[in-house]
Image: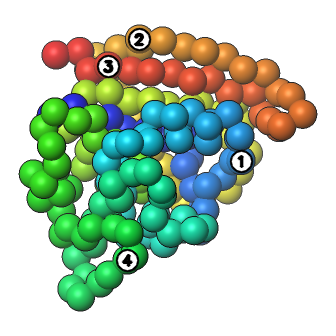
Amino acid sequence: MNISIIVAVSQNNAIGNNNKLLYWLPNDLKRFKALTSGHTIIMGRKTFESLPKGALPNRRNIVLSTQKDIHFDGAEIFSSLEEAIRHCNPEEEIFIIGGESVYKQAMDLANRIYLTRVEDSTKEADAFFPIIDEKIWKEKSREAHSIDEKHLYPYIFIDYQKDI
């Protein structure tokens, strides 16, 4: 299986507060769309509910929820990450897009992380990304970006590969 995690984090690994993203970075959103379009994305129920327009277009949306009889337009529901993965094509790249508990479950299963590190730690947060163990995960690429008219914070795109 080719399982990838995609996430934007602050310097202290914060990813969200009150079921909302902490940062609005147009280039991060473009990267997210470019990487995930045409693929399966897997997310928790709260992450799906936080999407402003529901299911993301041009992607197979899978939502994890233990609630029975739950339905979301444009999404398939599975009760666990393992069950969802079993229903995916083993040839395709699957993207884990959040939230905190789904990321924690996926760390052992994934073989790639597409991380956007926002150079800030001032935002209040209630959801965090797990610490990346550099004995297991090796940095493969890094692309730094400065503040500009559309980005209030400097940020870095970092790609990690599991060192097996």
Q: Nearer the viewer, mark 3 or mark 4?
A: 4
Task: Point out the tag, 4 or 2, that comes first from the N-terminus.
Answer: 4
Task: Point out the tag, 3 or 4, that comes first from the N-terminus.
Answer: 4
Q: Residue at x 56, y 33 (%)?
A: 31
Q: Is residue 155 above or below residue 23?
A: above
The kind of residue on which mark 3 rests is Gln
Q: CA distance from mark 3 to mark 2?
A: 6 Å
Q: Quadrant of residue 148?
A: top right
Task: Point out the tag, 3 or 2, that comes first from the N-terminus.
Answer: 2
The tag on residue 24 is: 1
**Tag 2's secondary structure?**
strand
Q: Visible in this render: residue 55?
A: yes
Q: Which residue is mark 3?
A: 161
Other-residue count near label 1 (Cα within 10 Å), few / some / many at <14 / 14–19 / ≥20: few
The tag on residue 140 is: 2
Q: Which residue is mark 4?
A: 72
Q: Quadrant of the C terminus?
A: top left
The residue nearer to you, when weighing 162 against 132, is 162
Residue 70: percent from the left, percent from the top?
A: 29, 84
Q: Quadrant of the N terminus?
A: top left
Task: Point out the tag, 1 or 2, that comes first from the N-terminus.
Answer: 1
Q: Residue at x 28, y 16 (%)?
A: 135
> Marks 3 and 1: in contact by CB < 8 Å?
no
